[in-house]
Amino acid sequence: ENESPFDRIESMNADSKHKGVREKKTSKIFLSIAATIIIFLSLYIHFKLRRNLSELSIDNVQSVNIERSFIYFKTDQRKIENEVFGNGEKGISSKIPSTPRNLDDIHVLFSTDCSEYQNWQSLLLFYSAGKANHKGPITRLASGCTDDEVAALQKIVQLLPPHHSVHFTPDFSIDKNTGKRYPYYNKPRALKHFLSESMPPVEETVIALLDPDMIFMRPLRPLMGLEDSFEFVKEGFPAGQRYGLNQGWAKWDDLPDIVKNPSSPALNISINDSYEHYLVGPPYLAHTRDMKNIAEKWVEFVEDAYKGHPSILSEMYAFCIAAAHLRLPHKVLNEIMISDSISEKEGWDLIKKIDDKDICDVIDTPLIGPVSNSLPVVMHYCQRYAIGIYFFGKRRKELQNIFSCDSPYLEEPPSHVGELRVKVLSGKVEDLSATKAQRNSFATCLILKMLNLALRDFRRASCPGEAYEKGLENYLKLTDMNENELADVEKWKRLNAI
C-alpha cells in the first residue's frame, strides 16, 4: 500500500513514544528495587548495631532491677555507643539547637573533689535523681583524684545507670597568689574542662550546674521554673535559683581590675539589675553554648574576685560578673530549691501544702506523679536541721564512710515528727514556730530517709549477701546529745521532743 511521508513520520513518532514509555516504566521498576534494597540494608545495619550494643551491655549485667538506681554494668555502654557512632568530636556538639528538643533535654553537672565526704554526697545525688525519675544524663566532675581514688570511683561508676558518669579533671584548687587551697576554684575550672574535653561531646541543649549536697525531689527540666512554666531555657536566656548574695558586687571598687576590660558590660550593671538578674546560684541553668562561654569568663575572673573578696562565696560572685560581662541576665527563680529553713526566697511554700501528719510519710511514696507536684526540684542540705531530738548536719563524722558495708543505717524520725514544736541542741530545748518546725521536720525526714534508701540500694548491689542482711539490723541515731542525755526518755516525751 502507498504510504505518504506524513504516515511514516506519524508511525515513527508512535514507535518512539511507546519506546519512551517502556523505558520510563523500566527505570521506575529499577529505582523501586534499588530503594527497597537500600532500605533493607539500612534496617539490617541498624538492628545489627543495636543488637551488638545490646549484647555488649545487657549480657554483661551481673544484677539488674529496673526499680534500683545502682545497676552493675561490666561494660560502659556510653563508651561503646561512642565507638560505634562517634565522629571524634569533643567538648560540645556542633548540632545543638537553640531551644530544647523536649523536657529531658538537659545535662546535669556537679563538681566535687575525691574525698569520702563528697563521695557519699555524690551517691546520694545520683540515687535521688533516679528515685525522682530524672531521665537526663548526670555527670560528676571529680577533680584532683589520685590514681587509687580514680580506680575506686571507676568501680563505683560501674554500679550506676549508663546515663550517670564521672569526668576526671586535674586539681584546680591551688590559689597562685597565696599557694593555699581554695577548693571552690574546682567548680568553674572543672566545668570549663568538661565542656572543652568531653568525649563523646555534650549533645543536650541545656546544662544545669548543681552542688553535690543536693537531693532531687522531682525531675529538673530545662524550664524557667517548675513544670507549670511553659518557657524554655534557651540560648541567650539562662536561669538560676535565687541566693542571699550581696548585690553590691556591681559597685566593687576593684571590679575594673577583675574584668580587665574598660568596655565590659559588667561595669554598667546597676544595683537593681544585680538584684533582679544576677544573684543566682545552683541550680544554674543555661544553654550549653552559653554555659561554655560563662565557664570561660568565670575561670578568667574567679582568682581576682577571690583575691579582693576572699570568702566561700567568691566563686559565686565571679559567676555573677561573668554572666553580666556576657550580657546574660538570668531569670531568678525562687521555687526550684529549698535549703535555709528561715528563707522566704526559696520553694518552702510548696512544702506548706503538706499536712503536718504527712510531712514524713510523703517521702515513703515514689517521688513521681501527684506527690512530686507539691515539691521543689532539689533540697540543698548545706544547713543544719533539727526537730525534737533529731538532728542532721552533713559534716557529722559518722557520715564520712556511710556507704561502706559495715556502716550503720540512720534512725529515722517517727511519723508524727511533723507535729513536734521544739528542737534540742546541746541539751537545750528551743521552741519552734509552726513554720520552722514543719520545714525542719521535712528536711530531716527527707535527708535521713533518702540516705537510707540509697544505702540499701547501693549495698544490695555492692556488698556480700551476708554483710548486707546483717547491716539491716544496725542503726545509728543522729542527735546533738550524748548517750546519758538520750537515756532520759520520759523527759523528752514530756517536752514533746520525741
Image: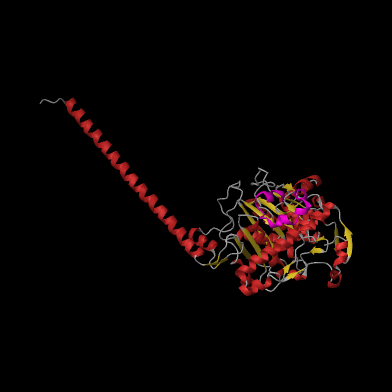
Residue beneath the point at 70% across and 61% down: 450
Q: Quadrant of the C terminus?
A: bottom right
Residue beneath the point at 69% across and 74% down: 406
Judged left or right of residue 12, residue 250 is right
Where is residue 332 shown, x and y percent of the image? 74, 47
- Depth check: give the residue in front, 267 or 472: 472
Judged left or right of residue 22, residue 195 is right
Residue beneath the point at 73% across and 51% down: 241
Main SS of residues in magenta: helix
Q: Is residue 382 magenta?
A: no
Judged left or right of residue 495, residue 4 is left
Where is residue 286 shown, x and y percent of the image? 66, 50
Q: Which residues are magenta?
A: 348-375
Against 409, residue 258 (above or below) is above
Against 335, residue 24 (above or below) is above
Where is residue 439 shown, x and y percent of the image? 79, 54
- Depth check: give the residue in front, 368 or 194: 368
Against 27, residue 108 (above or below) is below
